[in-house]
Structure formats: structure tokens, C-alpha cells
Amino acid sequence: MCPPAHFRVTYSINPWMDPGKPVDLPLAVAQWEMLRDRYRALGHTVEELAPDPELPDMVYAANGATVVDGRVLGARFAHPQREAEAVAHREWYAAHGFTDYHEPEHVNEGEGDFAVTASWLLAGRGFRSSPLSHPEAQEFLRRPVIGLDLVDPRFYHLDTALCVLDDATDSEIMYYPPAFSPGSRAVLARLFPDAIIADEHDALVLGLNSVSDGHHVLLPQAAAGLFEPLRERGYEPIPVALSELLKGGGSVKCCTAELRVAA
Ligand code: ARG
């Protein structure tokens, strides 16, 4: 995770970002700290990446790389405003003993567009990550890639429209079908017949931008419609308030890069 010490909305690269709308920085920091402390209270280790004053979107740490079995697929950002973030992530991995690092040739925004199940990589395309990043990810991460076409600019990253609930399985996800092309919707319905289907309200508060450890699901508190379906399936929803970070177009998942070290 990367603290939002320099978070602000001064440019707009997704429909959520309105540079005219003020950001309450102390509140953003307090909300982010609550999320970090929640993870720690649940027993998870949280590493902190040093924020760069020139990179206001750096708080969305999920975009900096994708780690599977300890192998790190670096990011290449679609927009120049975020380009330098990839370097900060690369240096962090180098300094922390991750030796299997792949510098990507094609644009991919890390876990923004890559989600990991037990055997697969679900991969978004359409707004940010290049379709060419999919075979590149498959080759390096050694997981079959299932390409999914995003069609609604509000759901510009896969992690705004789909969340893996248990990566020990290939069956447990929740998602918002209208964010996907008809063909991709059919693919998702075929692969995940028991998925939790989010409604428009829960999708529009970025309820799918959530993080699950296989039991606890940390999700935006406004996504109340997801709580009961999660409980019915044995998960424990943990609502978190991240209203300030929503102004940049992100929530829980965007702020969290997962270090999947075990092979
Ligand atoms: N403002 C950032 C951008 O548009 C938000 C990134 C959100 N991150 C995510 N994993 N969806 O790039």
C-alpha cells in the first residue's frame, strides 16, 4: 500500500476524476490508515511504498505490478501522468528480494486489469491494458489468461467491475455484468455460474473494488447490497469508508497490491 500523503485530483484520466471537486486530504489519509490498520488487525502483513509528491495517483498501489507465485509482472501505464509509478514499484520489488521481475513491453496497469483465481488470470482490456499484455502476462506468469472486454468507461479497470472472493478456487467471484461486452458476459456466466451478481447501485459505489482473503471481504461501506449475498456464502463483509479515494476513481482494491509469494 502507498499512503495518500500527496493525493489530489488535478487531472482527469477516468470519469470519476473531477479536478474541480475538492479532496479532503486529512480525511483521505485517515480513511486510508483505517484500511491499512484493518488489514493488520486481521493478521495480514502490510508493506508501505514511499509516496512521491509528483505522483498523486500513487495511492492506487494495485496498478504497479501483478505478483503471482512470487513472479512480478511490472506495469506500464496507459497515461503519461502515471508512467513514473511503474519505476517506484519496480525498485520496491528489487529492494525486497523479488528477483523474478518482468519489464513489460505492452501497456498493463497491474491488478487494475489482472485478477487471479486458483488457476487462471482474468484479464481486462478496453480502456487501459493493451490486449497484447494478455499473452505477455500468460507467458511470464504461467497462468492461462481469460480476456474480458470492458465496455463502460466508468468501469475502466477490471477491478472496478469484478472481484475474486476466494483464490483457492476457480469459482468464487462477484461482478457487474453490464461493465462487460455481451461475449465476455457469456464467458463469465459459463465459467462462474454461481457468482454473486452486483446491481448498478453497488457497482457505482465501486462495491466490486474489494479485497478478500478468502473469508473477510473488505469493501466500500456504501455497497450494502453485497453484504447479505456475501454472508449467505459464508464470507464476512467488512465495510470501509474510502469516500475521498473514490474521487480518484478507486477504492479498497485499487489501494491494495497483493503480494502472492507462495508458489
Ligand atoms: N486515478 C487512477 C487512474 O485513473 C485510479 C486508479 C484506480 N486503480 C484501480 N486499480 N482501479 O488510473
Image: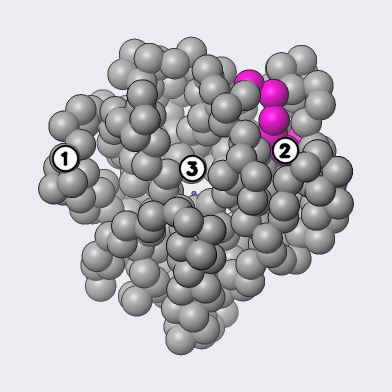
> Which is more foreground, mark 2 or mark 1?
1
| Numbered tag placed on residue 3 in the rendering | none
Q: Quadrant of the C terminus?
A: top left
| Residue appearing at x 18%, y 46% in the figure | 96
Pointer 3 residue: 112
Pointer 2 residue: 174
Question: Crowdedness of circle 1 by 10 Å Cα count: few (<14), some, many (20+)?
Answer: few
| Residue appearing at x 36%, y 69% in the figure | 3
Question: Crowdedness of circle 3 by 10 Å Cα count: few (<14), some, many (20+)?
Answer: many
58 shown above or below 27: above
Residue 54, image quadrant:
bottom left
Question: Crowdedness of circle 2 by 10 Å Cα count: few (<14), some, many (20+)?
Answer: many
Residue 107, how many percent across, how many down? 35, 33
177 shown above or below 27: above
Residue 251, how many percent across, how many down? 57, 59
| Residue appearing at x 43%, y 21% in the figure | 134
Pointer 1 residue: 97
Mark 1 belongs to which amino acid?
Gly
**Label 3 or label 1, whichever comes before in sequence order:** 1
Q: Which residue range is magenta in the image? A: 170-179
Tag 1, which secondary structure? loop
**Label 2 or label 1, whichever comes before in sequence order:** 1
- How far apart marks 2 and 1 lie (CA) works out to 33 Å
Can you see residue 247? no
